[in-house]
Image (spheres, coloured by chain):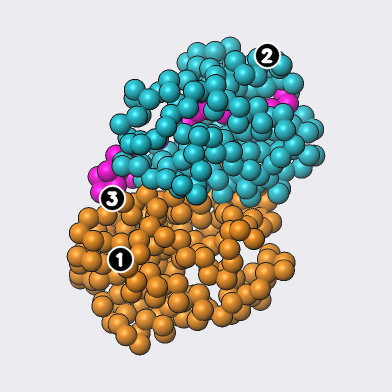
Chain colours: A cyan, B orange
Amino acid sequence: MKIILIGASGTLGKAVGRELNARHEVVHVGHSSGEFQVDITDRKSIERLYEKTGDFDAVVSTTGNIHFGPFDQLTPEQFEVGLRSKLMGQVNLVTSGLKRIRSGGSFTLTSGQINDDPIRLGVSGAMVNGALEGFVRSVAIELPCGLRINLVSPTVTEESWGAFGPFFPGQKPIPAAEAALGYAKSVEGPQTGRVYRIGWSRDQ
Amino acid sequence: MKIILIGASGTLGKAVGRELNARHEVVHVGHSSGEFQVDITDRKSIERLYEKTGDFDAVVSTTGNIHFGPFDQLTPEQFEVGLRSKLMGQVNLVTSGLKRIRSGGSFTLTSGQINDDPIRLGVSGAMVNGALEGFVRSVAIELPCGLRINLVSPTVTEESWGAFGPFFPGQKPIPAAEAALGYAKSVEGPQTGRVYRIGWSRDQ
């Protein structure tokens, strides 16, 4: 399969690239690195990306920004960061990708656990992750031509524990390579409209 | 308790008003009717509303617009309807309400089942409802002074079945008075950060 990996230079993206490279042609895309660049907050930038990559079998996104901060100090502009980037940026990867994806292809987006398992300073991220869950479940029933879509919601990785660990007291981090398995399951498996929670459960 | 009911003239709002009026002072707010008016997409309009109402013990919102349509035809502007109104409009009712709510008070917002139990044309609504779930769970752990927040997620009401029934094949509608009980539970009960699903379960 030809897979467009967006966010390829991040901790998670690198692990997903390693997992998928073994069996597929992976096109590495970043904001400022990789074979191609994209600004996912800009629909025209996404359109230009797909013009350059040509048709593909899968889009995997491991990208999207969020502003973290205390709720009573979050400005409208700070809420917009998450809504424009991690939410509508990933949604627009799907909207524009529909014109280029081959029959039977798949989209795999990334959320995270904090909508169900909240952390300090995480309100904007919780909102965006919840929105992505609703989006993926709902759009899955509308996709034509056997197209599929799933969401991977990994916990904190060991590789990023230094930066994010303090916000996740008592959380057992996972190797990024383990989180990457969720993406392989989405791309290579038959399911659609699913949320793959890796390293945590919403029943905790 | 003094309760600010926003969306008071809607099917759900009227039932919630009837339920709460029996035991509380309910201030009825609408977009163009009620004792006071507000445009929840405009933060200044919300600020002006709360200046007029003065301090209160609870905010109950049964309002918020969404654009329904097929995913592959949804424009960015149509996605914005839900993000500006039902999502950030209800979020801003909380943000601005923090300055006026009394210690021990509560916020109760409204979502709906379609993020977990998707329907045709419902992608934007699914996104917004999921975002509201994440928001409420997360902000609940940040609210000071014993303040609480919950989300009511009712299924379709019998009163609105004529308009929405065709989008919910096989759904058993509920009387709006039954949906209203979720709001009484949120306002009068001790819980916070909860989603009250009325007339449906996400395990279906």
Residue B103, percent from left and from top: 19, 65
Q: In the rendered view, would you say B38 is above or below A12?
A: below
Q: Which residue is disc 1 drawn over? A: B106
Please check the rendered image and state whether residue A69 is part of the magenta-colored stretch, yes or no: yes
Q: Which residue is disc 3 drawn over? A: B142
Q: In the rendered view, would you say B41 is above or below A65?
A: below
Q: CA distance from mark 2 to mark 3?
A: 44 Å
Q: What chain is tagged by disc 3?
A: B
* Residues tagged 2 and 3 counted as in contact (Cβ below 8 A): no
* Residues tagged 2 and 1 counted as in contact (Cβ below 8 A): no
Residue B141 seen anywhere in this rendered image of the structure: yes
Q: Residue at x 32, y 80 (%)?
A: B26
Q: Residue at x 43, y 20 (%)?
A: A159
Secondary structure state at the residue bearing disc 1: strand
* Residue type pointed to by label 3: Glu
Which mark identifies residue A22?
2
